Image: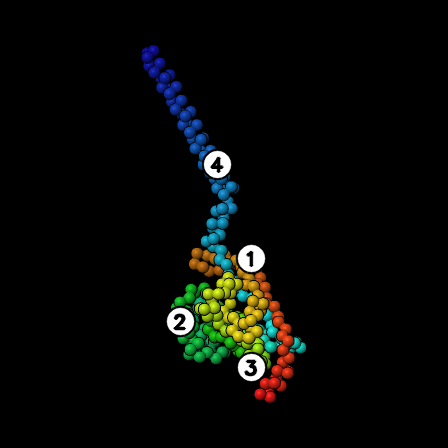
Amino acid sequence: MRLTIKDHIRESRLFNERAAIAFVLTVALLLVVVGRLIYLQVFSHEHFSTLANENRISLVAIPPTRGLIYDRNGVLLAQNLPSFSLEIIPEQVKDMETTLRGLRELISLSDNDLERFRKLLRKKRSFNSIPLKFHLDSEEVARFAVNRHRFPGVDIEARLIRDYPLGKLAVHAVGYVGRINEEELQTLDTANYSATRFIGKTGVEKFYEAILHGRVGYKNVETNALGRVLREVNRTPPVPGQNIYLTLDIELQKVAEDAL
């Protein structure tokens, strides 16, 4: 009888010791887990937030406005004019063929316009804007504006193009701009020209390119896993190019060219 009581006491003592050890280990493990969570959420928050942002924040370049060119008397020789293009976001269009037929009633669309659009439609993602027609005239812009409510997913985008109001007068001095070629890409500041397709080719347009071009701007946009833009996070506006006043008198230049 005494032996049974003695064994019971010893077993009870062993159980209590093991329970105490298990409790201490559990508390220690819990402290480790809590400490790790605090470290990740508080001390490493900025690091992991940066990693996440790298996966979902995209940098989009904004082109600067090119500077204007004037003669010595303030006569405008080179300017920027808006050029309007008709663009479509496919995922917002329920019936593409019906939409294209409807647009053709308002805007002159050639077979080449439609063929180019369909090729881009197969290549681009459905949430990307795809140009249907470039260089819309004022009447086409007005007609579409009145009927815009009929065409969800279709809109007009404005871009600036270089224009010379006096035509070919003094073209050898003023020069012109053209598309950037492969050779020019090798020497350009690619970051500053990341949103620009044109560069001065001859004359003042080329010689003062660095002054006329300006500085590119940027905007950070948040995108989802497919690359669709969700919102604009922040923006650094571009710096416009500087205007240039030449010593050239365009009236005297006209007289000289007429005499020749």
SS at circle 4: helix
Name the residue furthest right: 73
Q: Of the two numbered discs 2 and 3 on the same chain, state the one appearing first in sequence.
A: 2
In which quarter of the view is residue 233 placed? Answer: bottom right
Q: Quick check: 71 above or below 57?
A: below
Along the line of sight, the residue nearer the viewer: 84 or 179: 179
Image location of residue 44, percent across then percent down:
49, 43
Residue 130 sits above or below residue 31 on the image: below
Q: To which residue does mark 3 refer? A: 168
Say few, some or many: other residues with alpha carbon within 10 Å of mark 4 (under 14 / 14 to 19 / 20 or more).
few
Look at label 1 and name its amino acid: Asn
Secondary structure of the residue carrying tag 3 is loop
Q: Mark 2: few, some, or many residues within 10 Å (few <14, many ≥20)? A: few
Task: Write the residue at 38% across / 22% down.
Answer: 15
Question: Label 4 to label 3, Cα distance in Å?
Answer: 75 Å
Which comes before the other along the chain, label 4 or label 3? 4
Amino acid type assigned to the residue bearing label 3 in the image = Lys
Closer mark to the observer between disc 2 and disc 3 = 3
| Residue holding disc 1 | 234
**Earlier-in-chain disc, 1 versus 4:** 4
Specify the label residue 119 is tagged with: 2
Mark 2 and mark 3: Cα distance apart in space: 36 Å
What type is the residue that disc 4 sits on?
A: Gly
In x, y percent, where is residue 203?
55, 75
Measure the alpha-carbon separation of dots 1 and 3: 42 Å
